Amino acid sequence: MGNAVPDPIVTGLAQALAARLETVVTVMGEVIVREIDLYRNADVKLDDLHASLRHNVSLTIAHLVSEEPLDVTAPVAIGRLRAAQGVPLHDVLRAYRVGFANFWDQLLAEARHSGTRAEAALLDAASRIWDIADSYSTAMASAYRDTLAERMLETDRRRSALVAALVDGPPPGSDTAWEIAHLLGFPYRGTFVLVMAEVLAVGEPPLPGLDAKLRAIEIGSAWRAQPGHEVGVLTCPERGLADRALDAVRASATGRVGVSPAYDQLEHTPRALRYAQVGLESLPEGLPGVRQLDDTPLTEMVMTNLETTRRAVNRILGGLLSLPEDDRTTLLATARAWLDAHGSAADAAPALYCHPNTVRYRMHRIEEYLRGPLHDPKIVAELTMALDAVGTFPALLGHAGTGTVGSQRSAG
């Protein structure tokens, strides 16, 4: 902003304030401290405040007495400093408004002391003085926001790199899991859950609104973006909150999301990633859903060698898998209910909404496809393993692998 030819009377008033600059700054500082809690509570040191005011007032006076363009270096510097200090922007803007209002009051008092001509000249220059105030506030706020954005980007990059180190395992000579926990503001031991969310469109968050939902229940998180997915580590203050975290993930999911079982040490994050990845990949493509695998020996065994497990399931269930989908699904659900009822058709029937004789008939049909009779404990053990495997990983059923068998948690 350029400057008009200075009015000699206004120049004299400004120079009068310049002659007692320290008094002007002290009075402005007292008003700001009195009216704004943050400055009164010494979140910003008094010397720091006075230095800022001194610089701003000096540049404002220089602009009023010369034709030089407005110098906004002071408000830009203050905007960056206050952002780095974490001072809320609304408090800094209010300090500018209060400070400029007091500067105007002191300038007006000087004009009234000098006579009516000086007062009239100052009133004529009022719009220019408030233009200076507006330009300073705008420059300060812009610098504040730019600095905040830079700091947030740097923080995101740093946290993303730390999550990558957790997921991949810290390389030799780098940060340990304990050090990473400290840098993330996480406990080293606690309750953690790893989330892998499918990104459906570039630039679109796969879990919109999740951060706010997690903050509301005091769950911390750190994220890493990678091609096609986002990976996040959630930290829960208490174990019971892990279920609420899962509810928040379900409420935010736009695509497929895999969730690990809860774990208690950050160094176990690479293992948790594998669970979350398999959970995601076991969901049908093109449909939003959330799947959390349970931490069981069977789940770990299947994840270790999916193809071996597939062959075992095929040997155990045999021709049962080649039946039409409706027939196969009914028989597998009946087998699961029968096993849950410890082999009692009478106890399984209510869960299946059918007569106990219907359960017995279906179990006889299933027995025809097995490698032995159901009174053989080894055959029952094999059937249990196969049903648990396809319940955990429906893809083991082949093309028709969207079965409903199993007790793993899913939502879509």
Image (spheres, rainbow, N blue to C red):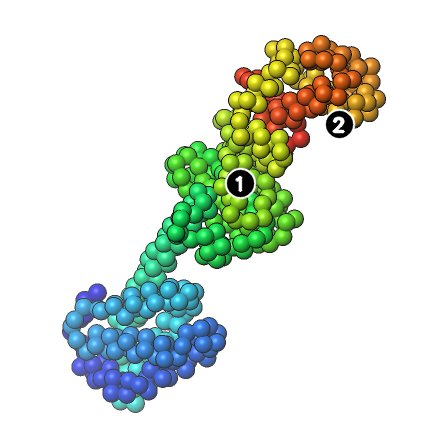
> Residue 5: x and y, percent?
15, 73
Along the line of sight, the residue nearer the viewer: 220 or 120 = 220
Quadrant in which residue 385 is drawn: top right
In the displayed structure, does residue 228 sit left or right of residue 320?
Answer: left
Along the line of sight, the residue nearer the viewer: 237 or 57 = 237
> Residue 269: x and y, percent?
51, 44
Local SS, label 2? helix
The label shown at residue 272 is: 1
Callout 2 amino acid: Asp
Q: Is residue 323 visible?
A: no
Residue sitting at x 25%, y 75%: 60
- On the image, numbered disc 2 is attached to which residue? 340
> Residue 66: x and y, percent?
17, 75
Quadrant in which residue 129 is drawn: bottom left
Residue sitting at x 63%, y 52%: 238
In the displayed structure, does residue 218 sit left or right of residue 229?
Answer: right
Q: CA distance from mark 1 to mark 2?
A: 28 Å
Q: Quadrant of the N terminus?
A: bottom left
Callout 1 amino acid: Ala
